[in-house]
Image (tube, rainbow, N blue to C red):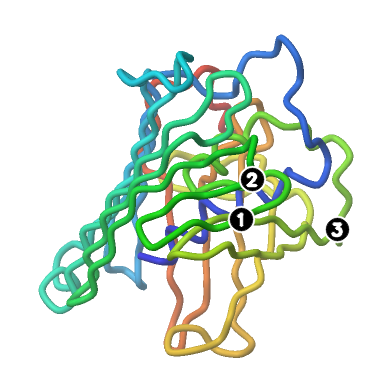
Amino acid sequence: MRFFNLVFLVALISLRGYSQELPKDALPAFQPGEHLHYKLKYGFFTAAEADLQVSNSDIKFNNKPAYHIVANGKTTGTFDVFYKVRNVYESYIDCGTLLPYRYKENRREGKYRHSDDIIFDHDSGKITATKGVFPFKGKIFDFPSAYFYARCLDMSKVKVGDKLVFKYFLEDKVQSLTITYVGKETVECSMGKFNCLKFNPEIIPGNIFRKDSKFYLWITDDKNRIPVKAQVEVIVGSLTMDLTEAKGLRYPLNNK
C-alpha cells in the first residue's frame, strides 16, 4: 500500500513550487461530502482498493473549525490471502490555511504494524509524534493534507521539465520527494477520458521497483485537480491505480 501513499504525496509536489499561499477568498477545490474510490490493479487482477473522504470535523483546534480527512486502503481477493493490508490514515486540517493540525495512522501490512498520533505546531516548527519531537522549517504536511492543499493552488506557470521538491512527515521522520512535470495528456480511466497534467515522481529501487522503473501520475486539468490514474513498473509487470468512483465534488468532473 505504500504505492497509494506515494500517489497522494505527489499531489503536493505537483503544485507547491508555484504558489506558497492559497488564493484569498477563494473556495477550496473540494468540499465536505467528497468521496473518491480507487482500485489498484496488477495486470487484470484487482490487488487493492482505496477510499478518500472529507467531512467537517467534530473537533476544533485552537477554537477553529477543521476538515476531517480519512484515507484507507486494503488488499482484495487472492492478494488479501497472501499479504493482508488494512491501512487507515486520518488528517485534521485548518479550514483556511489547509495546514494539518493532527495526523493519525493505523497500518497493518502482513505482519508489519505501525500506528502514530501526530500533532503539528506550525508556530514553533515542531512535530510531536508517538516516538518523539521532530523540528521542521517551512510548510510540512502529512500525505492526506498534502493532497488537499495541493488541489487549491495555481498551476498556470508550470513548465515541462520543472523539478519540484517538498517535505512531509511519515514513518517517524521528515522526508522529501522530487518529481518532474511531463506535460498535458488525455488519459482514460474507469470513469472516462480526461484532460490531465502528467507527472513523473522519483522512486527508489529495491524489492519492488527496478532501477529503471517508470512512475507516472495523471491529475485532472480542471478545478477539481484529482488523480484519475497512476502507473508504476515493478520487478515483474506493472501496477495501475484507477479512479472508479467520485461523489460529492464541488465542481463537475469534465470527461471527454
- Circle 1 residue: 135
Proximity of marks 3 and 2: CB atoms separated by less than 8 Å: no
- Describe residue 111's horizontal placement relative to residue 212 as left or right: left
Give the Cα distance between marks 1 and 2: 6 Å
Above-or-below relation of 129 to 254: below
Above-or-below relation of 218 to 54: below
Considering only order in the chain, which callout, 2 or 1, is on the residue closer to the N terminus?
A: 2
- Describe residue 20's horizontal placement relative to residue 252 as left or right: right
Decide: few, some or many residues near mark 2? Use Cα within 10 Å; few <14, some 14-19, many ≥20. Answer: some
- Describe residue 181's horizontal placement relative to residue 214 as left or right: right
- Circle 3 residue: 162
Q: Position of residue 66 (x, y in %)?
A: 45, 21
**Quarter location, residue 124:** top right
Disc 1 secondary structure class: strand
Considering only order in the chain, which callout, 2 or 3, is on the residue closer to the N terminus?
A: 2
The residue mark sitting in front, 3 or 2, is 2
The residue mark sitting in front, 1 or 3, is 1
